[in-house]
Amino acid sequence: MSATFETWTSVGELWAASHRAARGKRHRASVARTLLELEPTVLSLSAALRSGEWHPGRAATHSIRDPKPRTIVAAPFVDRIVHQSLCHSIGPVLDAGLIQDTYACRVGRGTHAAVRKAVAWARTYRFALHLDVRKFFPSIDHALLLAQLERRIPCSRTLDVCRLILAAGSDVIDPIRRHFPGDDLFTPWQRPLGLPIGNLTSQHFGNRFLSPVDHRVKDRLRVRAYLRYMDDMLVFHDDRDALHGIGLAIEAVCSNLRLRLHPWQVVPTRAGVGFLGFRILPDVVRVKRSSVARAQNRLTQRIAAARGNPAEVAACLSSLRSTFAHWKHADSWRLRRATLHALGILGGEDDDEG
């Protein structure tokens, strides 16, 4: 059971949530100012939530183009305290309705656990199918999402806060509007859409939104070799035609959720399948070339910034360690060595990428 509204809006829970929200961000001016006056901030926030007077603040947005154009939304730090406390409360309830092989936003899972499971199945099955949703977060339908949340969350006051967060998020994003069977001309403009990328609540809500796809594949189609990381789905099978049928079934469920998939095709596992920045084959796992190029460019920039600036050295080393820790989940010894050569950190002859 989730905590009650009175529990997650209490001063103690909001105080703990503020420290979770501040992890890794204490150097930012807005965070530091709030932490300096944390006691009155938390007292005021708790009172506003319980009286029904709390409303999300104005979020900041910025655009990125790596690896693709996206708008990132940064909610005010006080709002992020609310998101943290809310998700700490409802997270276990939403998680309880998910299948085992859903890997995003869950304790003990994550990107690398999903890749390990995909590698095991790539070594077992002859064919693979990778599916992902077009513009997933900007396409999420609020009415359909709220219907799912209402089935899992029994507290009406908690649901009211969820509605406020959804409404505030749709004000700062550009939703993707499409027509689906049964729509009239104006239907897509009459339905509130979209979750902002960057909010903790968006991660939990988005992960929950595709749960009907998981249950259709696992419970109705009885497919064992299926996994999902947010909107990235992988299915394995020994029969190409059967796997194509599974893809059509997933596409139909996504259409019912008012989502559309990117074009897809069934491929032999020996040809490799891309998933979460890796290229997975039965006998080897490689880091995707596009991911390598982005990481190497980022590291080159960090090293250039660190030259003559001791304050940047620690950040540069941290970035290098995290990149290599990620690459270690692939067969990447030669890649890491070649990267060190290219960055001028390791002398000697370059090795080929591996």
Image: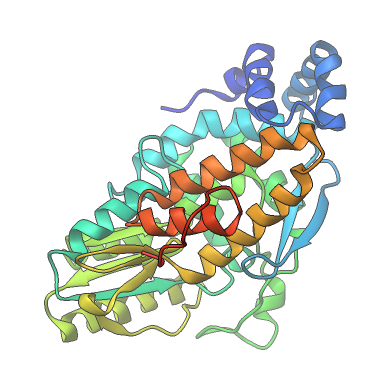
Residue at 60% x, 43% y is: 319
Q: Quadrant of residue 36?
A: top right
Residue at 29% x, 49% y is: 99
| Residue 172 in view here | no
Q: Quadrant of the C terminus?
A: bottom left
* Residue 254 position (above or below residue 51): below
Residue at 72% x, 45% y is: 164
Colour pattern? rainbow
- Would residue 304 be found to the left or right of residue 340 on screen? right
- Would residue 88 be found to the left or right of residue 47 on screen? left
Give how far across and how far down residue 268 sits, in percent.
22, 80
| In front of the other: 238 or 193 | 238
| In front of the other: 133 or 70 | 70
Give how far across and how far down residue 277 sits, in percent.
45, 62
Give how far across and how far down residue 310 sits, in percent.
77, 32
| In front of the other: 92 or 150 | 92
- Would residue 204 be found to the left or right of residue 18 on screen? left
Give how far across and how far down residue 94 sits, in percent.
43, 41
| Residue 350 in view here | yes
Q: Quadrant of residue 265?
A: bottom left
Residue at 46% x, 51% y is: 208
* Residue 273 position (above or below residue 64): below
Total numbered circles: 0
| In front of the other: 52 or 347 | 347
* Residue 151 position (above or below residue 295): above
Q: Quadrant of the N terminus?
A: top left
